[in-house]
Amino acid sequence: MNISGTIENDIQEHLTKIEQKHDVTIIAAIESGSRAWGFPSPDSDYDVRFIYAHPKDWYIQLARERDVIEVPINPVLDISGWDIRKAMNLANSGNAVVQEWLVSPIVYRQHDVLAPLLRQEIAASFNAKATYHHYFSMAKGKLGDVSGDEVKLKRFFYFARATLSARWIVEKQTMPPIEFGKLLAGLTVESQVLNAFTQLIYAKAQLGEAEVLSLNPDCFAFVMKAFVRFTDEDIERLEPKHRSLDSSDLRRLLGHL
C-alpha cells in the first residue's frame, strides 16, 4: 500500500525519538489497522504498533518497570508498542494481536536479525483454539452492529474480518492472513462473492469512516453463513498450541542486541 512521504517521514521520526528517549531498540514496527487489513477509508488513521527491547541488564531488575510505550494520539497517528517480554508472555496466553503484528504486510522498521527470529518464535506459539475464541468473540460482539438495512461499512468489515478469521482457523488451523483479500480468497472461489467484496472495498475507500451504506446481499449472506456454521465439534478439533516461550528464548533473542 502506498503511504505518503510526509506520513512515512513522521512515523520514522516518531520511532527514532522513541528509541532515543527510552533507550530501546525497535525490533519491528508495523501497521495494525484497516490500512494493513486492506479496507481503509480516506480518513482512516495510521495504527503504528511496535515491539521493542531494552538493553539486556534492564531485564534483571528486581522491580519491573512499565512495559508499554505510548505516544499521544493525534487525528493521523496512533503509535504504541510493547516490550519484547510482554509480547512473548501475551503470545503464550494465546493473544492473537501479537501474532497479527508480526505478519502485517506493512512494515515501517525492523531489526535485521531480531525481527525474523521473533516472528519465528511467536509463530511457534500459535494456539489455534485460543485464537479462534479471540476472533469468534470479536465477531459475536459485533453482530449487533450489522443488523438493519444500512450499516457503517467500517462495522461490517470488522465483523466480516473477525468471522472469516475464525472460519479460517477452523478450516486450516493456521494463523489467518491479515490482508482481507487473501483471507477471503482462501475461503471461497465464488466469483460473485469475490467481485461483490471488491466493489464494497472500493466503496469504503471513497467514503468516510462514519458513512453508512446498503450492504451487497452477496457479501452479507456469505459472512452470515460463515458465522452460523460454527459448532462445538469445530472447536474440539482445534489443536493446542505448539509450544510455550520461556526465559531461555528471551535470553537467546536479547543476545542479538
Image (tube, grey):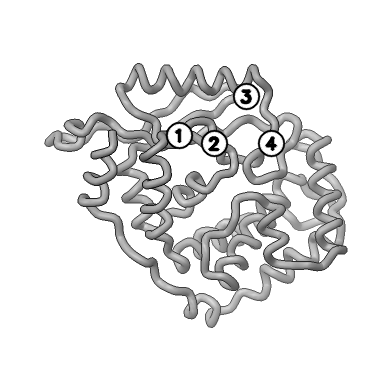
Residue 205: x percent and y percent? 79, 38
Task: Look at the image and tell me in which quarter the N terminus lies.
Answer: top right
Q: Residue at x 40, y 71 (%)?
A: 240
Q: Badge 1 is on which residue?
A: 110
Query: Mark 3 and mark 2: span between their CA atoms?
Result: 17 Å
Toward the viewer: 164 or 51?
51
Considering only order in the chain, which callout, 4 or 3, is on the residue closer to the N terminus?
4
Which is more foreground, mark 3 or mark 2? 2
Between residues 249 and 148, which one lies in front from this camera angle? 249
Please tell me the numbered disc located at residue 231. none
Measure the alpha-carbon separation of dots 1 and 3: 22 Å
Q: Residue furthest bottom?
A: 233
Among the 4 quarters of the image, the one containing residue 38: top right
Assess disc 2: are there few (<14), some (14-19) or many (≥20) residues with their C-alpha within 10 Å of its C-alpha. some
Residue beneath the point at 59% across and 73% down: 171
Q: Quadrant of the C terminus?
A: top left
Q: For the image shown, how many numbered marks are present on the structure?
A: 4
Earlier in the chain: of badge 1 and badge 3, it is 3
On the image, numbered disc 3 is attached to which residue? 76
In the displayed structure, would residue 100 be above or below residue 78?
below
Three-letter code, disc 4: Met
Mark 4 sits on what residue? 1
**Crowding near pointer 3: few (<14 within 10 Å), some, many (20+)?**
few
